[in-house]
Image (cartoon, grey):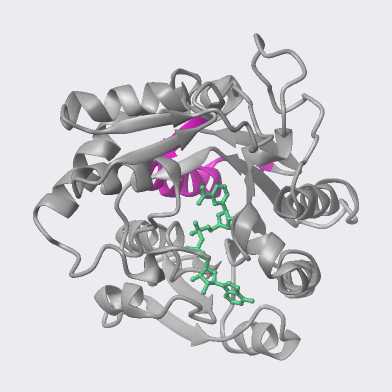
Amino acid sequence: MTRSKSILVTGGAGYIGSPLVRLLLNNNYNVITLDNLMFGGETILGVWHHPNFRFVHGDINNPDDIKTVFDEYKIDAVVHLAAIVGDPACSRFSEMAHKTNWEGSVNLVEQSIENNVERFIFASTCSNYGKMSDPESYVTESSPLSPVSLYAELKVKFENFILNEIDQSTSFCPTALRFATVYGVSPRVRFDLTVNEFTKELAMGRSLEVFGKDFWRPYCHVYDFARAMLLVLKREKEKVAYNVFNVGSTEENYQKQMLIDEIKEQIPHAKVRYIQKNEDPRDYRVNFDKIKNELGFEITQRVADGIKEIKYLIDHKVLLNPDDPKYKNV
Ligand SMILES: NC(=O)c1ccc[n+]([C@@H]2O[C@H](COP(=O)([O-])OP(=O)(O)OC[C@H]3O[C@@H](n4cnc5c(N)ncnc54)[C@H](O)[C@@H]3O)[C@@H](O)[C@H]2O)c1
């Protein structure tokens, strides 16, 4: 009988990590989660007793914590999600962002190579594209990157490191996934992301002020990200090694006003005021043909589905206090 593969998920207690951990366990992988639990560890309680789940409380910025994992487990693949996440968090905690999103991440790669890890998936972001030069066009994986925040700068720098700066003669197989902006319910739901935040506020009967209503951005459901990472783990190395893919769907690019229109379909009395204050310099529409054509990835959820489930969560009081700061990264 072949041994089940063991996957190290850094940041496995987080918004994207917690559904990924469950999907991997359901697909017969052994999962080792390394997380320093910045937002608590309730998200892993549901898998605590799963025979193939292990939790290591540790910090990727501490090389010994990473070493402990590699000493204890034979790791076949690493999915690297642990980070200081988002523009506001990185600008507020810039020193920690440099450490985690660059230094600690480089150390993780080096130890992964030393320990003969085969696959390495890095959670990058479509924020790397910054502002589109031609507002009518769609950016692809080969478009120039023009990060406009420390968060995206560090993502670009680390992507460049894993794709271009390491010795490619080993069996190490790194892949960068540029995620769209995520939405949807997860064991660690976040309400500092556009679709989730707008829906939550309006479902709670509050009025909303929206700036930059014309700005484009692509969106993708958190569960579809987990599916994309599983797919990359399973596809032939030649297709994914030293490669980069946008993750999402070309049909799922929206202007903020379009998101509000979608929410109003489900919350007709929603009160929204648009503010003329174009302070967010990110504005991009993204093409997702590459992951569809080369890996066969299709999304299963659309923004309207995410709005529906967040509204349901709020309406049925699944969360005791949706305003709890733990649902935000800053
Ligand atoms: N949410 C999005 O829209 C989005 C979009 C593109 C890319 N990403 C990327 O996906 C990844 C996961 O994002 P998320 O939304 O799940 O964020 P999250 O903040 O919910 O999860 C991050 C997890 O990493 C852990 N962590 C942070 N620093 C750590 C450290 N030094 N050592 C160990 N663990 C640490 C945190 O405790 C948390 O559990 C990140 O790399 C993020 O940049 C997210």
- Estimate the x, y position of residue 140 in percent, counting from the top left: 68, 23
Is residue 289 shown above or below 23? Answer: above
The picture quadrant for ligand 1 comes to bottom right
Q: Which residue is located at x 79 percent, y 34 percent?
A: 145
Q: Is residue 297 magenta?
A: no
* Residue 137 visible in rendering: yes
**Residue closest to the eye, 209 or 83:** 209
Residue in front for this viewpoint, 109 or 6: 109
Magenta highlight on residue 226: yes
Q: Which residue appears at 39% of the width and 21% of the height? A: 258
Residue 20 in the image: above or below residue 299: below
Seen from the viewer's position, the closer of residues 101 and 176 is 101
Q: How many marks on residues?
A: 0
In x, y percent, where is residue 149?
Answer: 74, 48
Indicate the quadrant where residue 309 lies. top left
Magenta segment's dominant SS is helix
Query: Whole-percent x and y of residue 15?
Result: 42, 60
Q: Is the N terminus in the top left, top right, bottom left or bottom right quadrant? A: bottom left
Vertical placement of 85 versus 197: above or below? Answer: below
Q: Is residue 286 above or below residue 46?
A: above
Furthest residue toward top: 136
Question: In the picture, residue 327 is in which quadrant?
Answer: bottom left
Position in image of residue 318 (x %, y %): 14, 62
Residue that appears at 38% across and 80% down: 41
The residue stretch that appears in magenta: 218-240
Q: Residue at x 62, y 63 (%)?
A: 89
Q: Is residue 300 visible?
A: no
